[in-house]
């Protein structure tokens, strides 16, 4: 009977440590929460885990709507891509807040050949949509 007492005391101590470390008042949990709020820029493509408020968006409409167009937002650190819809509209999702160059590349279809266009210094802020409006194709 005496051998069971130290084991049960050790088990009780272990369970209390686990319970305390998992509680909301735990300093360990508070430190992890503080770090998580600082990390959105570390993994920009992990949008399923982070709130949309950490990311920005770029939208616009290509006029006239080409059959196929790829829109690329890029800077020294990141590159994001989107494809224009049939009506020419596009949205680039989950952008890390920064300044981007936006390049529009066209795939010539049906005799319509447009030049690639680059829009420099498009500023993206967290939780907002930067609307480029109607973009005329040349």
Image (cartoon, rainbow, N blue to C red):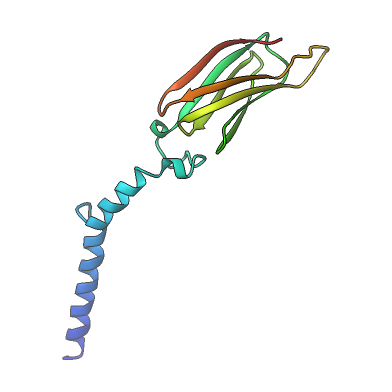
| On screen, residue 18 above or below 90 | below
Outermost bottom residue: 2
Q: Quadrant of the N terminus?
A: bottom left
In which quarter of the view is residue 89 placed? Answer: top right
Residue at 26 percent of width and 57 percent of height: 28
Residue at 22 percent of width and 56 percent of height: 27
Residue 37 x, y percent position in the rendering:
34, 42
In which quarter of the view is residue 134 placed? Answer: top right
Residue 69 x, y percent position in the rendering:
69, 21
In front here: 134 or 74? 74
Residue at 19 percent of width and 85 percent of height: 6
Residue 14 x, y percent position in the rendering:
24, 72
| On screen, residue 2 above or below 81 | below
In which quarter of the view is residue 77 placed? Answer: top right
| On screen, residue 9 above or below 20 | below
Q: Quadrant of the C terminus?
A: top right
Residue 61 x, y percent position in the rendering:
59, 13
Residue at 48 percent of width and 44 percent of height: 43
What number of labels is visible?
Answer: 0
């Amino acid at each position: 009977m005496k051998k069971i007492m130290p084991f049960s005391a050790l088990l009780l101590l272990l369970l209390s440590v686990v319970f305390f470390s998992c509680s909301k008042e735990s300093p360990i949990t508070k430190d992890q929460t503080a770090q998580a709020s600082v990390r959105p820029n570390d993994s920009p493509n992990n949008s399923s885990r982070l709130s949309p408020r950490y990311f920005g968006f770029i939208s616009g409409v290509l006029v006239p709507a080409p059959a196929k167009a790829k829109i690329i937002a890029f800077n020294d650190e990141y590159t994001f891509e989107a494809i224009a819809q049939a009506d020419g509209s596009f949205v680039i999702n989950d952008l890390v807040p920064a300044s981007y160059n936006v390049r529009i590349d066209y795939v010539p279809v049906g005799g319509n050949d447009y030049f690639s266009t680059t829009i420099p210094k498009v500023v993206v802020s967290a939780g907002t949509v930067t609307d480029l409006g109607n973009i005329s194709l040349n």
